[in-house]
Image (tube, rainbow, N blue to C red):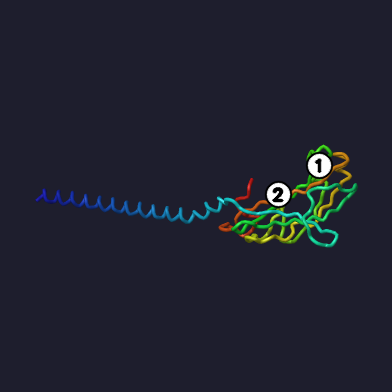
Amino acid sequence: MPVDNTQATADSTKTRKRLWVLLVAVICVFAAAQTLSVITREKPLLDRLQFGAVGLETSITTIDETGAEVPAPEGGELGTGSVHMERIVRVKNTGNHALFIRVKLRFECIDASGAHHPVDDLVSYDAGDSTWIERDPSDGYLYLTAALEPGETSEPAITGVDVNTAAAIARHGEGCTYHLVVDGCGVQSKNQKSNDVLKAEGWPA
């Protein structure tokens, strides 16, 4: 009889061990399923950071003598003093995804020998549409507040430029020509954490 009790105790112990092993296995399977679920939910986050190729183009136009808006010339000599140029800057989304957009404006003086000199401190810009904003403090970019849809063109970021050509000539000599440069970039707006362009992730460094 004692032998039978001992065997029964051993069998009971083995059964409990098997149950514990089974329970642990179930917990592991459940944990693995939860991990896979998390990975699946995180995938859009990872995809959002891999923006891939985006399509956009910037345009610089001016107003001709008839009042029509036409492409602005690449350069040109300006008079001496404080000179105003009508320059209208827009961005078009040429890709297939809605984009958050930002642009940085640069102004160059090209001297008589062909060397390019930044003269951003000698220019000021006429503000464009209110859909364009700056950070506070500014990082040098203008941001379009709403995402730009495929095929859509923005309202003007600026409408004019004032140049202190006298100061530019004093620095770089007579015969300077001038060049407005617009650096534009965009990131997909889909799957962002926020609809605020200033909080968008993925901007190039």
Q: In front: mark 2 or mark 1?
A: 1
- Circle on res. 110: 1
Q: Residue at x 51, y 55 (%)?
A: 44
> In the picture, which quadrant includes the C terminus?
top right
Q: Residue at x 78, y 42 (%)?
A: 118
Instruction: Look at the numbered disc 2 and give the secondary structure of its residue.
Output: strand
Neighbours of disc 1 within 10 Å: few (<14), some (14-19), many (20+): many
Q: Position of residue 1 (x, y in %)?
A: 9, 51
Q: Could you tell me how far apart the alpha carbons at marks 2 and 1 are, in whole angstroms? A: 18 Å
Q: Residue at x 72, y 61 (%)?
A: 155
The mark that comes first in sequence, 2 or 1, is 1
Q: For residue 117, what is the image quadrant?
A: top right
Q: Position of residue 66 (x, y in %)?
A: 84, 62
28 or 116, which lies in front?
116
State yes or no: discs 2 and 1 in contact (Cβ < 8 Å). no
Q: Position of residue 147 (x, y in %)?
A: 64, 60
Neighbours of disc 2 within 10 Å: few (<14), some (14-19), many (20+): few
5 or 192, which lies in front?
192
Residue 183 shown left or right of residue 29 in the figure = right
Which residue type does callout 2 highlight?
A: Asp
In the image, residue 109 sits, relative to residue 37, either above or below, namely: above
159 or 139, which lies in front?
159
Residue 190 shown left or right of residue 4 in the figure = right
> Which residue lies under the disc numbered 2?
183
- Circle on res. 5: none
Which residue type does callout 1 highlight?
A: Ile
